Image (cartoon, coloured by chain):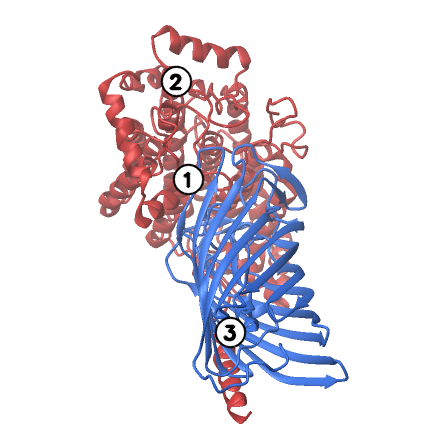
Chain colours: A blue, B red
Amino acid sequence: MKSKYLTACMLLSGMLFHSVTRGQTEVDAIMMNKTQFCAGFMYNYSKWDEYWEGTLKRNNLNLGDVSSQSVMFMANYGITDKLNVMVGAPYVWTKASAGTLKGLDGVQDISLNVKWKPYTKVFGKNKLQLLLVGGVSTPLSDYVIDYLPLSIGLGSTNVTGRLMIDYVHTSRFFATGSAAYVWRSNVKLDRTSYFDTELHSTNEVKMPDAASFQLRTGYRGKYLIAEALLSNWTTLGGFDITRNNMPFPSNKMNSTSAGVNAKYTLKQHTNLSFLGGGGYVIHGRNSGQAFNVNAGIFYALYFNKKLDKNNFNQ
Amino acid sequence: MKKTFRYAGMFVLVTGTIVIACSKDINDRTANLPPLEPASTDIDAGTWKPVLLASPDEIQVPAPIPTNVPDYVAQINEIKATQADLSDEEKGIVKYWSAGGILRWNEILRELVAKHNLPPYQNEDGTYPAPSATNPLAYPQFPFANPPYAARAYAYVSAAQYDALVAAWHYKKLYNRKAPYNVDSSLKVLINRSELPSYPSEDAVIAGAAAEMMKLLFPGDQDYIQKKAEEHRRSRIISGANVRSDLEAGEALGKAVAQRFVARARTDRAGVAGGNPAMWKKLEDDCIARGETPWYSLEVPKRPPMLPAFGVVKPFLFDSLTTIALRPGPPPPVASQKMKDETKEIYDYVKNPTREQIRIVHYWADGVGTYTPPGHWDAIAAEDFIKKNFSEVRWARNMALLNMSLMDAAIVCWDTKMFYFNPRPTQLDPAIKTTTGIPNFPAYISGHSTFSGAAATILGYIIPDRASAYTAMAAEASLSRMYGGIHYRSDCEIGIETGNKVGNYAIERAKTDGAD
């Protein structure tokens, strides 16, 4: 059953002010078997015209539609059946449809995640798994961060620890819930001083940490996976954008989004998979109300043919 | 499975180490300064030339009570009682304020400017509301501390503090009351000892002048300002630097001098600098009548130009006729080849800006939500002044010279901008996308360049060994506006030149004010 590995390469994207492009693999419960490798590209497009200035919903005629596009390379390798390692890095473009501000583009953050499945319990037709994911991400380039909402990223080095619980029924319906703590490093601006809620005579900005939650459920079949997901990002601290001010990296950026994902693996050629998905921010704070769609293609390599790939998928 | 644990363990160890190794505390550059230790007491500063006061004794300060009477002893005992059990908070207050009163109030002012430097959001009908000084907390809050407003605020507070300190030094020398720790050697002293007479307290003068002046400038922030002033005075009791009567006399003097400046500010024409629709239209019509293309706002909805009548505000260093005399000749005509070439030059800068160019743009942008270019120059100056160990009165004099230059630069610049009403590069070529916000007023001459030219000139006089550094900074600030896509070369070059001329007026004043 090769298809499952490919799901491991999905992405989710673009829900906050900056164009977040997060790997999806570290948020799902799918593991690759030992020595198996898959890699591919995801394209993502996100756009918003309304955003939350603090808790106030508004638009901005001097920005119009703020959009970002990204192409992310991702790779996933099974060190063992229960330990996977993933890397990813996107190139991001931003744009505002109105006003005079120039969009930016560049290589954003590289991320490295290690996913470990220490515990599995089968009872009757049900299976319960516990997964732990640890990740690090850091900017690959010295991109501009103090230019929101058109910066390509926030510039912090993040260390993430995630706990995940996955339930699967033999009918192939599943549900996964996860919670993560994201430790974020301080960032440095190009200017020597800034005002958040007080004046700081330094270029260094203290970035509040964040929490991330996700629920996903759907059908995880042999060739098709279809799921709905609900994601939340909550900044643990930070401040609200003041009236008619610009966003700032250490704002209290929160967002809750709903979305769907699908993945299809070719029956004739199971090395190849296609992915697609979309989402919409249903609630936020200091965040854009983004709509996003994505599509990707992944290719899998099976280095060890002897392995049983037809065991219970997931 | 064992292997799995080993990998997992290594991973936890590595990530855990990263988290623990990186402290998130940030250090402000001026948070941990040593107490001010002036190289000279400038004991004769009472003879320095004030800005507004006709003489240093224009405001009467009564003679202090002698230091051997029970009332004075009671005041000494107040210090002793305060010092008997000092909390960390109290020590922190002393540490903060002892770095220098002029420095700290300049920082507070910069903070309030940054807080209030936000353009009002439009009304439903596409017009824009104006902040109201009589209802400062209603939206849009008063003031909108944009660059001209900020330049004027920095100038008034600095000049009021300077005049008040000249008067204070006059009385210090006249009454020659010793500092409490020189009267009673058993007092703890948490600051650097000084032979400077302590009556009236220079710190209370500084706080009183600032707080009184800022009532007018930031009427919605009185709680915060009064709390800071009270804390400043308290720091002097805690540290053993002043008895209460030093502080009371200082506060009264500071306030009284500031009231002279408040009276001037009420009639300096800044109150009507926002203009009105008829005036905005006339600026446009006059430009068309000269056969030129007028500036229009690139904001949606179109916003009236920022403080279009600021050019007629009464300057500090010269009169309004000189404002007009300093107005440079016209920019290249919009239809001219020179203007086409200059527009093309800006397009080439913004088409594919380098990371270093964007860094320069953002380093000097000082736009919305910041303390503005005048505040940036104050910050640059303050960090250099710290190293010079100036007395408070010399700090005030140098800050006043700088900030009067910056305000007068704003006046000359705004007069020029509104007189020529020249479009921004993006208006002439919409393909010019900018890497910083386009300021909502005409291009010629560049405000950043005029401010920077003026500041670099007077600062180069005050600290000659930094003159070439200031010139280089001004040149970079000026260039940043071309890199950002919001100014032509003419705006920047003529802006620097014009700013230099304004700065020279400050030098003329400095040469004759008795301080050098």
Q: Is mark 3 on a helix, strand or loop?
A: helix
Residue B128 against residue B41 in the figure, above or below:
above
Q: Which chain carries label 1?
A: A
Count neighbours of disc 1 (C-alpha within 10 A) and say few if under 14, some if 14 to 19, many if 20 or more. many
The answer to whether dots 1 and 2 both sit on one chain is: no
Relative image position of residue B199 (x, y in whole percent): 51, 46
| Left or right relative to A251: residue B367 | left
Residue B361 against residue A313 in the figure, above or below:
above
Q: What element carries label 2?
A: loop
Q: Quadrant of the N terminus of chain B?
A: bottom right
| Left or right relative to A185: residue B293 | left
Total number of numbered labels? 3
Count neighbours of disc 2 (C-alpha within 10 A) and say few if under 14, some if 14 to 19, many if 20 or more. many
Which residue in the protein does label 1 denote? A102
Q: What residue type is labelled 3?
A: Val
Give the mark nearer the N terminus: 3 vs 2: 3
Q: Which amino acid does label 2 sit on?
A: Phe
The answer to whether dots 3 and 2 both sit on one chain is: yes
Disc 3 versus disc 1: distance between alpha carbons?
35 Å
Do tag 3 and tag 1 residues touch (Cβ < 8 Å)? no
Q: Which of marks 3 and 1 is in front?
A: 1
Which residue in the protein does label 3 denote? B19
Do tag 1 and tag 2 residues touch (Cβ < 8 Å)? no
Residue at left 61%, top 59%? Answer: A261
**Residue B421 has which mark?**
2
